[in-house]
Image (cartoon, rainbow, N blue to C red):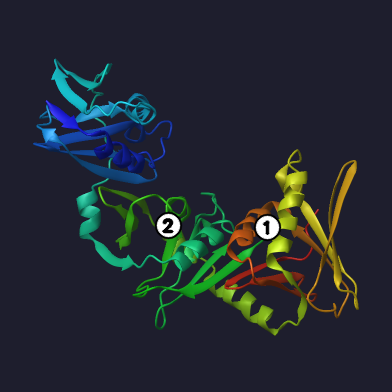
């Protein structure tokens, strides 16, 4: 018999459940289980791979590999969170079945036929190139950049946030781009430096706040999140390594630096205004979300509005200084709303600085260490 305490299996399965199940990929639907004495390893794999190790009492009852249906195994184990009893999980072999008992609950599993497609964690870590130092600045900038990127396999070169190799000290710079928005984030690491440029996979950014994250590793063609008792990894886009438009984004940034400031307003108030407009438009297709931002020379008030069939929503916000020229902007609210939603929480006491390049039809938005460029007019 093999036994595991509740706290020795549930947090680890939280890690492995980060591997998303995908229809038609058996290795994502069945956990590969193999044990050696009092230690057991479980793996899962789709476009993301994962492996955890469990150390229990007794001996794992199967000598051969066991392929466990995650759709039934996970709910049975995770239900223990809602129960008051703290019984251990007991794993036994009865015939060809795996029997799992927890208090008065019991479930029997059949092993599936041999499943292929699981990654080899040992081999991936063997090719480890560098450790990416974890800092709050880095996490914040990756999360904000994710909102500006394209999560689409049709344009794999944009399906990432591009983490640039450190050129000096502990400074870091990140880039992201979509068809309508480009992004640059700058910040500092607490220690160390980025020794290689890395197109950071968007899915892994969602997991950076997961409990127990210890390290971010770059291992060959993979980015790896290392937890105390497990790993999650995803391949780096080779298309992004070759074709991510970092040079074009830098050109945008240089043009933006030369523009005069059009207006400055409270970033928190401006961001919350954008969130409210998005809330008003919940019933409308997101791609139809366009926000109009207008100002008059000599005024210190900006008009912000959005229109749909049968309704027009308008709000006003004050600027820090008098506006020096007339402007009228049309921004893609469906893209900018999540960005401003993030900035509203992270830039409470900063100003939002907007520059308008009339010649190229581009708006440049800066809030602290976050820089965004987007078209000033939307195509019909």
Q: Residue 237: give its label.
A: 2
In the visual, does 12 lie left or right of 259? left
Q: Residue 323: give its label.
A: none
In the visual, does 204 lie left or right of 320? left
**In the image, what residue occupies the spot 9% across and 32% down?**
58
| Image position, residue 363 (x, y; %) | 73, 70
The secondary element bearing badge 1 is classed as: helix
The residue positioned farthest toward the front in the image shown: 84
Instruction: Give residue 38's quadrant in the image.
Output: top left
| Image position, residue 347 (x, y; %) | 61, 66
In the visual, does 330 lie left or right of 114? right
Q: Is residue 55 above or below residue 92?
A: below
**In the image, what residue occupies the spot 53% across and 68% down?**
175
| Image position, residue 63 (x, y; %) | 10, 30
Q: Which residue is mark 1?
A: 336
Residue 45 visible in this rendered orientation of the protein: no
Q: Is residue 87 above or below residue 195?
A: above
| Image position, residue 92 (x, y; %) | 15, 22
Taking depth in this image into account, of 343 and 198 the one nearest to the observer is 343
Q: Are there few (<14), some (14-19), or many (20+) residues within 10 Å of tag 2?
A: many
């Amino acid at each position: 018999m093999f036994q595991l305490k509740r706290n020795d299996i549930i947090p680890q399965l939280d890690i492995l459940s980060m591997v998303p199940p995908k229809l038609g990929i058996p290795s994502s639907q069945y956990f590969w289980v193999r044990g050696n004495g009092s230690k057991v390893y479980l793996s899962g794999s789709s476009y993301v791979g994962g492996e955890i190790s469990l150390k229990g009492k007794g001996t794992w009852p199967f000598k051969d590999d066991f392929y466990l249906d995650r759709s039934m195994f996970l709910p049975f184990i995770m239900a223990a969170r809602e129960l008051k009893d703290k019984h251990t999980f007991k794993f036994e072999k009865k015939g060809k079945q795996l029997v799992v008992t927890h208090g008065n609950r019991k479930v029997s599993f059949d092993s599936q036929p041999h499943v292929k497609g699981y990654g080899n964690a040992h081999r991936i870590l063997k090719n480890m190139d560098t450790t990416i130092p974890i800092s709050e600045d880095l996490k914040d900038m990756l999360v904000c950049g994710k909102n500006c990127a394209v999560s689409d396999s049709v344009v794999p070169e944009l399906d990432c946030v591009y983490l640039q190799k450190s050129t000096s000290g502990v400074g870091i710079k990140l880039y992201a781009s979509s068809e309508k928005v480009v992004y640059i984030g700058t910040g500092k690491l607490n220690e160390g430096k980025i020794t290689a440029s890395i197109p950071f996979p968007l899915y892994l950014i969602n997991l950076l706040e997961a409990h127990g994250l210890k390290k971010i590793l770059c291992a060959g063609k993979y980015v790896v999140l290392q937890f105390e008792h497990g790993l999650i990894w995803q391949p780096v886009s080779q298309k992004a390594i070759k074709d991510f438009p970092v040079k074009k984004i830098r050109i945008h940034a240089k043009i933006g630096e030369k523009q005069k400031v059009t207006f400055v307003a409270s970033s928190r108030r401006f961001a919350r205004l954008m969130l409210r407009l998005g809330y008003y438009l919940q019933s409308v297709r997101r791609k139809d979300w366009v926000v109009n931002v207008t100002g008059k020379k000599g005024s210190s008030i900006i008009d912000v509005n959005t229109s749909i069939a049968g309704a027009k929503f308008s709000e006003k916000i004050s600027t820090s200084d008098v506006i020096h020229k007339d402007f009228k902007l049309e921004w893609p609210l469906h893209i900018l709303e999540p960005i401003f939603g993030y900035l509203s929480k992270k830039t409470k006491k900063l100003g939002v600085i907007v520059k308008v390049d009339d010649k190229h039809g581009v708006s440049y938005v800066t809030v602290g260490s976050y820089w965004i460029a987007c078209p000033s007019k939307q195509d019909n």
